[in-house]
Image (tube, rainbow, N blue to C red):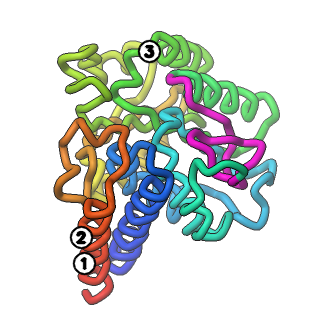
Amino acid sequence: MKQNEKKALQIAACKIRMGAIEGVYHAKSGHPGGSLSAADIFAYLYFKEMNIDPKRPKDENRDRFVLSKGHTCPGLYAALALKGYFPWDELKKLRHIGAMLQGHPDMKGTPGIDMSTGSLGQGVAAAGGMALAGKMDGKNYRVYSVLGDGETEEGEVWEAAMFAGHHKLDNLCLIIDDNGLQIDGPTAEIGGPEPLDQKYRAFGFDVQKIDGHDFDAIEAAFNHAKTVKGKPSAIIARTVKGRGVSYMENQVGWHGKAPNDEQYRVAMRELKKTLSELEAE
């Protein structure tokens, strides 16, 4: 990846993190940890990978995206706002009565949302259905879905994987945000979903494991996934929960709570410093 292109993605990811913090802070509730860990994936998908146009959010030939771990929508909303689907100021209205942005994605009320999600496991199942529909309709669009590592403890995730493997959905790409933490603690201690790579291969997937914060690795993984024929793809992206905000990193308590006034100021100060350094390079 060219350096200027990588820098642009790093800047986008930093702004997505800032938007996620902005939204959760003003909502006084929400899920910052997983929003921050997936920010680099959101940045790559929306600013490099997917064939989408904010001016035509319902284009039948667009690529589809499903946030299966729907509680981390503050990060997705920030990506959509940055892309131009709706004004940035909408982020400050997150979870407010009458506002566009709900606590989980709503395809009926928010431009750019392809599937309403929230109940873990259902999003990835819907993504498989979208991919099969594309095959049946002779469309060339691809379907992407981000799910959490804790989410893979849901049985529906594996029903969806069986479905995707059986139908050889090579237009489906799953990205597992493997940050090692879920609401109750480390995933290894709560549900023990590993070895995820072996499990997905057993269900007929092409599997890659990458550093989910390394844009060169992210690009290589998505480029490879587009060459895979006859089987769906799973990219297991190792990430840091709370990435970019020092006191949130690898802290399970930041799975689902909002920062107070001082914590908000610290988070935004750190992210603004990161952004300034990136823009000065």
Question: Is 108 covered by the magenta stretch?
Answer: yes
Task: Reply above or below: 179 against 27.
Answer: above
Secondary element at tag 2:
helix
Please report whichever mark, 3 or 2, sits nearer to the chain's N-terminal start: 3
Q: Nearer the viewer, residue 230 or 108?
A: 108
Residue bearing mark 3: 154
Residue depth check, mark 1 versus mark 3: number of the one nearer the observer? 1
- What percent of the width, then of the height, locates residue 175? 43, 38
Label 1 sits on what residue type?
Lys
Quick one: quadrant of the N terminus?
Answer: bottom left
247 or 152: which is nearer to us?
247
Magenta stretch bounds: 99-120
Q: Residue at x 38, y 61 (%)?
A: 17
Which residue is more in the foreground, 18 or 129? 18
Query: What is the magenta segment's predominant secondary structure?
Result: loop
Q: Residues within 10 Å of mark 3 (few under 14, many from 20)?
A: some
> Which residue: 38% across, 13% down?
202
In space, the residues marked 1 and 3 are separated at their CA atoms by: 38 Å
**Mark 2 packing: few (<14 Cα in 10 Å), some, or many (20+)?**
some
Which label was assigned to residue 273? 1
Contact flag, marks 1 and 2 (Cβ < 8 Å): yes
Coordinates of residue 27 in the picture (x, y in percent): 50, 52
What residue does disc 2 label?
A: 270
Rendered location of residue 56, percent (x, y) = 78, 61
Q: Nearer the viewer, mark 3 or mark 2?
A: 2
